[in-house]
Image (cartoon, rainbow, N blue to C red):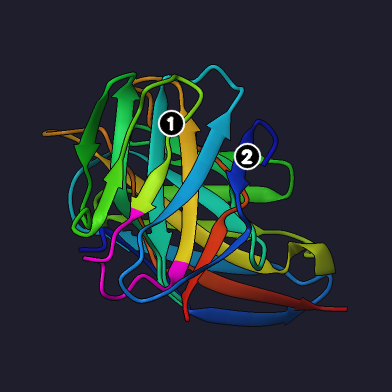
Amino acid sequence: DGGITQSPKYLFRKEGQNVTLSCEQNLNHDAMYWYRQDPGQGLRLIYYSQIVNDFQKGDIAEGYSVSREKKESFPLTVTSAQKNPTAFYLCATSVQGVYEKLFFGSGTQLSVL
Amino acid sequence: SQQGEEDPQALSIQEGENATMNCSYKTSINNLQWYRQNSGRGLVHLILIRSNEREKHSGRLRVTLDTSKKSSSLLITASRAADTASYFCATDASGGSNYKLTFGKGTLLTVNP
C-alpha cells in the first residue's frame, strides 16, 4: 500500500448525502483508477484517469463523479444518485498506458446509515 | 461482466501443502495477472504472465497459461499461514481499449497452521 493513501478508512453516508473519498499518491504515476468491491465479488471499475484533467467512465460510473486537477490526487464523490453505495472502494495507480501492474491503496469502507 | 473467473471459490489446506487456484477467461488477452488481497486491505500484485508465455515462476509461486483453453493456474508451494488471503486473476484484453483490467471474483485461500 506504500505510496497511495486513501482516506478515510471508514465512512458513513446518510440518505441524500454526497460523500467524497480521497486518494493521494506519491508514486509519480500518471494513471489512477477507482474500483468498487462488493462482498465475495471481484473489482469493478468506476472511473479511470490516464492524465491530469482527463478521466473516463468505467463499467459502473452511474452515481459517481471524479476530478483530476492534480497528478497526485483523484477524489471520488459518491452522489445521492448512487442508491446502493455500501461497498469497499479501492484506488489504484499505474504507469501511464501500462496495465501491467496496478498499485492499490488500503481502501475505504463506505456504509449507509 | 467478469472476464476472469477463479475456481474454486474457497480452498482450505494445511500448512506445508500446495495450493492450486484456476482462472478462466473469455476473450483474447495481452497478459494475465494474479493479485493477493488480505482481508480489509488493498490488492498486491503477485505475478504477470504474457500471452506468449506458458509458465512463470516467482519464489514459491508458479503460474501457467493455456491460451487455447483460455485458462491460467496459480500454484503456491509449501504454503504458510501468512498465505491466507483472497487471490484474484486479472486480464488485460487484447484489441479495443486496453485501458482497464478486468478482475475475477477471487479464490479465498485459508492455510491452517
Q: Is residue B105 visible?
A: yes
Q: Main secondary structure of the magenta part?
A: loop
| Quadrant in which the N terminus of chain B is drawn | bottom left
Which of the 4 image quadrants contains residue B16?
Answer: bottom right
Residue type beneath disc 1? Glu
Q: Position of residue B101 (x, y in %)?
A: 33, 44
Which residue is painted at 44% across and 55% down in the image? B89
In the image, residue A28 sits, relative to residue A25, either above or below, namely above
Which label belongs to residue A100?
1
Residue type beneath disc 2? Thr
Residue beneath label 2, please? A5
Question: Which residue is at the front of the view, B87 or B21?
Answer: B87
Q: Is residue A27 left or right of residue B25?
A: right
In the image, residue B6 sits, relative to residue A90, either above or below, namely below
Q: Circle 1 sits in a helix, a strand or a loop, which is it?
A: loop
Q: Circle 2 sits in a helix, a strand or a loop, which is it?
A: strand
Which residue is painted at 57% across and 29% down in the image? A25
Q: Is residue B56 magenta?
A: no
